[in-house]
Image: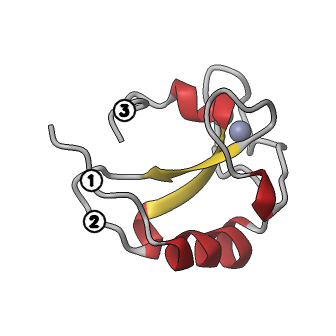
Amino acid sequence: MASPPPFEENTVKLRFHGIAKGQCECDGCEDHEDRCEATFTYDERGTADDDGAWQADHIDPDDGNLVLNCRILCVPCHKHTPTYGQH
Ligand SMILES: [Zn+2]
Ligand SMILES: [Zn+2]
């Protein structure tokens, strides 16, 4: 499967501030059952090597780059998604 192009900065900002409100959007994974409690500032966006960083994830890798297909995840939660590393 081809990787989708990265989100526009504006899309990520909208999602981060308007919907995620600076909190990881994971509703449950191997690490926790309820909404993840990790919170961040926008500047903490980073890579998997950055401690405490967050990343923008494609909810459906085939569904384009709209705000609704973007979610904010902390790195540990992102690593638990089945598609991690593919997009
Ligand atoms: Zn999380
Ligand atoms: Zn999680």
Q: In what element is the residue under mark 2?
A: loop
Q: Nearer the viewer, residue 71 or 86?
A: 86
Q: Nearer the viewer, residue 62 or 29?
A: 62
Q: In what element is the residue under mark 1?
A: loop
Residue sitting at 61 percent across and 28 percent down? 29
The residue labelled by disc 3 is 83
Amino acid at pointer 1: Pro
Residue 43 quadrant: bottom right
How many C-alpha atoms fall within 10 Å of the one at disc 2: few (<14), some, or many (≥20)?
some
Mark 1 vs 3, N-terminal side: 1
How many C-alpha atoms fall within 10 Å of the one at disc 1: few (<14), some, or many (≥20)?
some
Report if the CB atoms under discs 1 and 3 are less than 8 Å apart: no
Residue sitting at 36 percent across and 42 percent down? 87
Report if the CB atoms under discs 1 and 2 are less than 8 Å apart: yes
Determine the CA span between mark 1 and mark 2. 7 Å
Q: Which mark is residue 64?
A: 2
Q: How is the image coloured?
A: secondary structure
Amino acid at pointer 3: Thr
Determine the CA span between mark 2 and mark 3. 15 Å
Q: Quadrant of ligand 2?
A: top right
Does residue 17 sit above or below 87 in this rendering? below
Residue sitting at 62 percent across and 30 percent down? 48
How many C-alpha atoms fall within 10 Å of the one at disc 3: few (<14), some, or many (≥20)?
some
Residue 35 percent location from the top left of the image: 74, 45
Determine the CA span between mark 1 and mark 3. 12 Å
